[in-house]
Image: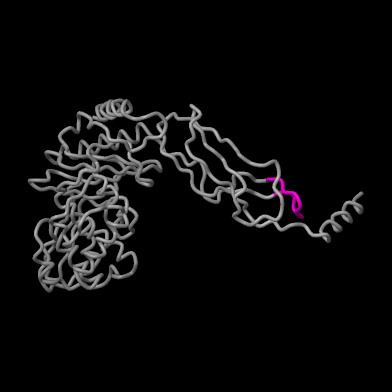
Amino acid sequence: MQKQALARAMALALALLMLLPCGLAQGIETSMPANIAGAKAAVLAEQAGGQAVAAYKAEERMEVGGLTRLPALLAVCEGIDQGLLQPSASVTVSEAAARIKGPTAFLSAYEVIDAASLLKAAVMILAGDAIYALAEAAYGSATACTQRAQARLSELGVEADYTELMGMDTRLSANDLMALGRALMQSPAFTAYSSLFYDGINHVDGRATELASSNRLLKTSVGCKGVATGSSASAGYCGVFSVTRGGAAWICVVIGAPNASSRSEAASDLIDYGFAAYEVKALARAEQVLIESMPVLGARRSSVALVAGQDAVLLLPKGTGHEAQWELPENLTAPLEAGEAVGLVRYMDDAGEELCSVELLVAEAVPQAKVADYAALVLVCWVHG
């Protein structure tokens, strides 16, 4: 089975590499690989930066089943992260929350349950009643949470009208779902439960609700951390999947697969392709010392360290080499301010194309030498011969 999976992943990698330009992948629209041809749309992106390397109809908004609940879930999780609701708080379930259909935690109107249990159900199975109850508890009303969800969509660059908490009439694209998945994976409240495949919650009346995620990759794909799945007769089988291995993380979206098995297979193959064909290289990190000693004229000290002005973390096809080209004067002249830009380092690939550039900043302030400083220096030199 492992050999077959590896062979399938490498075949997919070869097919997609033919569709990608040399150098950095630019999130281009590509043909759907044959083994996921049944899906209506898909996208594979590096999770940290959101850079897509394979996509099919990724910008087309369409029905996505229960995944329309993700904006509300994001607002709820971020509200909990911000302290609007403590996980230990007791929540009284409203009649409106208990009436929500679809995947539910089987909550009863007016039952009292802890927010942590509701959050577990919301994250694991997108339980609508749990999301609704948490929304009311965190924001005061479903309307206020819906407005926050709409605001978050706008902040993420998702141009969709979100006018109802469960998003019943909302259409989302694969790119939209990818943006939502990336945001959810940054929420501690969400990731506290997103890796669970099977669990449950207990009600105060003695009932127990079993929670079984329909995300099969949680069991079959090493490093899967979430995100969510959903389906309907008209939308087909949809899912957002996040997988981390060896410090690299990929996020994959599949919309409209014909069944649950093909949804999982499509996502697995795309993610395996990402790990097989690409690597994340950290060429520099913000404030990392890149030059330990840069000569300085006109100062008491003879040199100063230079640091990177920003991160230089690139997604590159495996085997891509790089070299640094430095653009600096022979000497710096005091005075210098901490954080002052004094040069540049350009990272080039094997073909001489620029991958990215990073400003070189002065690590600490260097004041100009005064007459007394020069006199002291002369005295030192005279004493020591």
- In this view, the residue in front, 97 or 199, is 97
- In this view, the residue in front, 276 or 175, is 175
**Whole-percent x and y of residue 371?**
83, 59
User: Which residue is at 44% across, 40% downward?
Assistant: 314
**Whole-percent x and y of residue 326?**
60, 38
**Is residue 297 in the magenta section?**
yes
Q: Is residue 328 left or right of residue 33?
A: right
Color encoding of the figure: one colour
Q: Which residues are magenta?
A: 294-303
Asked where in the image residue 267 lies, by quadrant, the reply is top left
**Whole-percent x and y of residue 33?**
23, 30
On the rendered image, what quadrant is the N terminus found in? top left
* In this view, 152 is above or below 352: below
**Whole-percent x and y of residue 251?**
30, 44
Number of labelled discs? 0
User: Which residue is at 10% across, 56% downward?
Assistant: 102
**Is residue 56 in the magenta section?**
no
Q: Is residue 189 left or right of residue 34?
A: right
Q: Is residue 230 left or right of residue 54?
A: left
